[in-house]
Amino acid sequence: MNDERLASAVSDWLKESDTPPRDSRSAVAWSVARAGKTRRARRSWPVAWSVGGQIGRWRVARISGAAVLVILVIGAALLRGGSTTPEAEERLPSGRHR
Amino acid sequence: MATESHPRLYRVALGILRDADHAEDATQAALVDIWKYLRRLRDPVAYESWSYRLLVRACMREAKRAPRWMPEAEIGTRIDHGASDALGAVIDRDQLVRGFRRLSVDHRAVIVMRYLLDMPIEAVAEALDIAPGTVASRLNRAMTALRAALEADARSVAPRLEPQEADR
């Protein structure tokens, strides 16, 4: 089989099997939505309602903004509760001063 | 822009990947890339070839992700090329599909752009960001590999067909 004949066979086959996309509009809408989501994920966490993905150079596991707030509140509470002031150290466990 | 580009890109993706679902995924990935990197495109005239470049990359990613075996629905029509042919009188479309699948995505992309879109060598070179000479040699290697695959396929099919023919 010479080159031209093979090229012609391939061309015919490719053109015969050429079919349009099933639903172009929904595919485009899906792509645009996905692209928008990717852009939102790039923003810093106070703007986008989730943290993670690509943050600067680092790739971080995705976590929702609400979860971050909960972690911050619990962390702050633990820090305040666990802190020891000089007065607290002076106090005996029963609450009486030495 | 996306609405206009989608059918054009899908057509090429389907030509390269030969599977509607994978072609859809690759097209969507390419559209997302276009959306993300559009600011980097300096010359708006080059949009079409640039979008093909992103699509071919998306097809490569998709081909890596896809399993080696994929169901094939394209069975049937036969293309007659005359009895004097060295390969045989008829090339089965199914053989073409199998032969095409053995090619790399690079080779498939060149074949699809050249023979499906009828793009000149220079346009293919611009789309793939390679030299025209590279396109020509890649196309030549692709067709040689396809011919070899067809011949190997014909050899493996012929002994199986002979007893059936004898029964008739």
Image (cartoon, coloured by chain):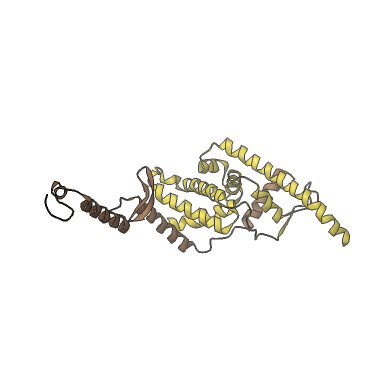
Q: Can residue B167 be seen in this view?
A: yes
Q: What is the x, y in percent for residue A45?
A: 30, 52
Locate residue B4, reporting x and y percent: 46, 57
Q: Where is residue A91 in the image (x, y as percent from the top left)?
A: 14, 51
Chain A's colour is brown
**Along the viewing direction, whichever of A94 and B100 lies nearer the viewer:** A94
Q: Splitting the image into 4 quarters, where does residue A69 fall?
A: bottom left
**Residue under the image location 14 percent in, 46 percent down:** A86
- Residue in front for this viewpoint, A15 or A50: A50
In the rendered image, residue A35, in percent from the top left (x then y), is placed at: 40, 54
Farthest residue to the left: give it: A97
| Screen quadrant of the C terminus of chain B | bottom right
Taking the image as shown, residue A49 lies to the left or right of residue B132, namely left
Let me know if residue B8 appears in the view.
Answer: no
Identify the residue shown where x is 26% and y is 53%: A75
In the image, is B82 to the left or to the right of B60?
right
Residue under the image location 43 percent in, 61 percent down = A29
Indicate the quadrant containing the N terminus of chain B: top left, top right, bottom left or bottom right. Answer: bottom left
Q: Chain B is drawn in which colour?
A: yellow
Placement of A6 over or under A28, stated as above or below: above
Q: How many labels does the image show?
A: 0
Residue A88 located left or right of residue B151: left
